[in-house]
Amino acid sequence: GAVVSQHPSRVICKSGTSVKIECRSLDFQATTMFWYRQFPKQSLMLMATSNEGSKATYEQGVEKDKFLINHASLTLSTLTVTSAHPEDSSFYICSARSRLAGADTQYFGPGTRLTVL
Amino acid sequence: AQTVTQSQPEMSVQEAETVTLSCTYDTSESNYYLFWYKQPPSRQMILVIRQEAYKQQNATENRFSVNFQKAAKSFSLKISDSQLGDTAMYFCAFMNPAVTSYDKVIFGPGTSLSVIP
């Protein structure tokens, strides 16, 4: 089956630093990847849609300059949280749309827990 | 705009019994997909079942089945012979491929299901 990985699974950083999270589709090519944020006991909130070779599409209210997204290849998208602050602490999840599967198939990574001190 | 509602924040069921989780959605589109995702304590999102709106037959996957009522915009999930491993958050989700070429998925708020031994 389609597998999506995320790295790191957990990261702790100091306020003001930047953190990069990687999302990889391991056994399929993903033209589109999605980045979500999830607060405890809440649903997934879509932050942005990442398209290979083009600029990401951000959801309303998501700061483009703070959450930098790069989709450099068909198997890799990165989310960089710049100048992180404690309020950025959250669980970040990526998903990838399989090019071979039907349009209704998204596969999720295991998530990254970010803690900003 | 499409919305997804899950009116049961928490539910519990005895092991081996049957439980039904409710979901309603709002859309003016006729072609779309509906999903149930499971998020266990590991927080890995797992696709449980999917339904294409143009199919009248309810989808089934082993112990999981749905009751799709298109006119009522209802999409409930039935779990038969509940097992301890079914304990998780369950998210109902909607996708309309016509709205955006990027197949954005809209999630409901979730239902926390506990299976009691």
Image (cartoon, coloured by chain):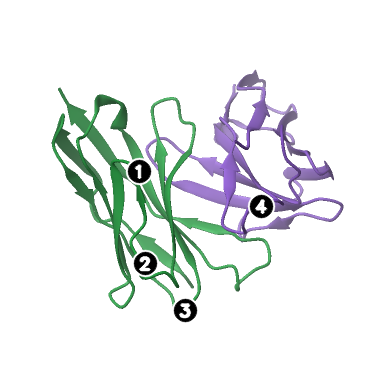
Which residue is tagged 1?
B90
Local secondary structure at mark 2: strand
Say which of A6 and B81 sits in front.
B81
Residue at (63, 37) in percent of width and height? A2
Q: Would you place residue B59 above or below residue B46 in this image?
A: below
Chain shown green: that is B
Locate residue A55, reporting x and y percent: 82, 55
Which residue is tagged 2?
B25
For disc 2, the neighbor class at 10 Å (few under 14, some 14 to 19, many from 20) is: many
Q: Earlier in the sequence, mark 3 or mark 1?
A: 3
Gap in angstroms between the C-alphas marked 1 and 2: 15 Å
Q: Which mark is residue B30?
A: 3
- Do marks 2 and 3 share a chain? yes
Residue B20 is left or right of residue A97, and the answer is: left
Q: Would you place residue A75 above or below residue A32 in this image?
A: above
- Residue A63 seen in the figure: no
Residue at (61, 61) in percent of width and height? B103
Mark 1: which amino acid? Tyr
Q: What colour denotes chain A?
A: purple
For disc 3, the neighbor class at 10 Å (few under 14, some 14 to 19, many from 20) is: few
